[in-house]
Image: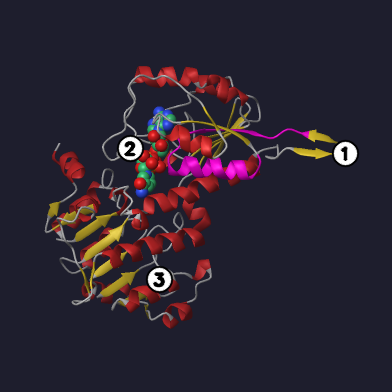
Amino acid sequence: MNILVLKESNFSQEQRIAITPENTKRLGLLGNQIFIQAGLGLHLHFTDEEFVKAGAKIISDPQKILPTVDILLSVQKPAIETLSLLKQEALVISFLDPYLEKTVVNKLLEHNLSSISLELMPRTTLAQKMDALSSQANLAGYVAVITAASLSPKIFPMMTTPAGTLSPASVFVIGAGVAGLQAIATARRLGAKVEAFDTRPVVEEQVKSLGAKFLKIDLGATDATKEGYAKALSQEQLEKQRIAMEKACSNADVIITTAQTFGKKAPLLLTQKNLQSLRAGTILIDLAIDSGGNIEGAKPNEIVELFGTKILGLSNPASRVALHASQMYSSNLFYLLQHFWNKEEKKFHLNTSDEILKICLLTHKKEIINGSVKKFFAS
Ligand code: NAD
């Protein structure tokens, strides 16, 4: 099959690339021809020559090749003009943000393109290798802590020196999913004292196993969805949570928020009133900024100073460690293609009744396949 990878359409905000030379080689061995836009990986020190050595053909005029492409791989949604030039029934694999990107979804339908939206990948053991949401969230948790440490006027570990003893920094992590657990682990590795909270009680054990304290708050029913995602809390529950977190927040040198509810706006966890009661010098990192933010007043990739605190909404955090993020992302794509590879026909087998594909397949034959997105578009 002809597989194409283009430079990301919003390069200024997206430094990740959808394929590395290593995965170019692996996809080639399955029987594909990979086409790479010239200069795709230069900013990550992957030269065109390396891609050629791995079996890729370098193209400088993507418009010419688009009508012959079977699979288009991307990190963020491809440009609408790119989708228009693909042949009908080509497959697009990318983060497609289907709940927010109506124009993209409509284009995919109208142009009869099949598409896999990586946000929709089921969070199951079988799909783990293809789970780009997890691989990128893991890096986001790491980036949040490293960024907070670089902004903090305090060091993270305890230090005993002849000049005196410095106590460890206190880090409070709100939301202990993939990113939150990695933030806890990274902060612990740096020697900080860590406390965490999540509405899903099942994570208490995971938090404790990383050497952190779990803050218990009784919010009444806080069940997860059948996919394992947190359910949105009521306004009363959220207010109760804010009050119950006050002490942990005011004891913290660093607060990292990661709370999200899938397909919905992120919950507002810290209002300006809460911020007023924090210690001056507290660093706050909002990892949910791209879905609306957990902290009132947070702005994407801008440090906002409020009541003596510094608040940073980290937009697209994985792009800040783009080399490793691309390595993991392109491996997720490779495993996805390999899992559904038909060896005899040397092609991707788009089996719509497969338990993974029927969930992450966004569009196919002019229809929305994922049940929740279909319902969302019908409403
Ligand atoms: P996410 O990004 O959707 O949300 C981040 C965290 O915020 C979640 O832990 C959620 O419970 C929490 N949260 C939501 N509202 C909150 C609130 N008001 N206060 C505090 N915390 C709040 O989550 P994710 O990291 O994408 O993980 C989603 C689910 O998928 C989890 O159950 C996770 O364990 C599961 N998962 C499973 C696998 C697997 O089995 N292979 C892989 C990855 C993730």
Q: Which residues are magenta?
A: 166-191
Identify the secondary structure beneath mark 3: helix
Q: Please name the residue shown 20% across and 44% down the image.
A: 373
- Kindly identify which residue carries mark 3: 23
Describe the element under mark 1 as helix, strand or loop.
loop
Query: Which label's residue is closer to the chain start, 3 or 1?
Result: 3
Q: Position of residue 285 (x, y in %)?
A: 53, 37
**Residue 199 sits in quarter:** top left
**Given contact means CB atoms under 8 Å apart, are the residues at marks 2 and 3 in contact?**
no
Callout 1 amino acid: Pro
Q: Give how far apart the Cα atoms at labels 3 and 1 are.
A: 51 Å
Residue at image position (57%, 20%) is 247
**Horizontal relation, residue 329 to residue 63: left or right:** right
- Name the mark on residue 162: 1
Q: Quadrant of the C terminus?
A: top left
Count of numbered circles on the image: 3
Camera-nearest residue between 198 and 92: 198
Q: 10 Å neighbourhood of mark 2: few (<14), some, or many (≥20)? A: some
Mark 3 residue CB less than 8 A from any atom of ligand 1:
no
Q: What residue sits 42% from the left and 17% below the top?
A: 240
- The answer, for residue 8, to whether it is visible in the render is no
The disc, 2 or 1, on the residue closer to the chain's N-terminal end is: 1
Q: Residue furthest right?
A: 162
Which residue is the site of mark 2? Answer: 229
The CA distance from mark 2 to mark 3 is: 30 Å
Is 27 placed above or below 158 here?
below
Give x and y (percent) for residue 265.
Answer: 34, 34
Q: Amino acid at mark 3?
A: Asn
Examine the structure image and report whether residue 178 is included in the region drawn in magenta.
yes
Image spot of residue 202 (x, y percent):
40, 33
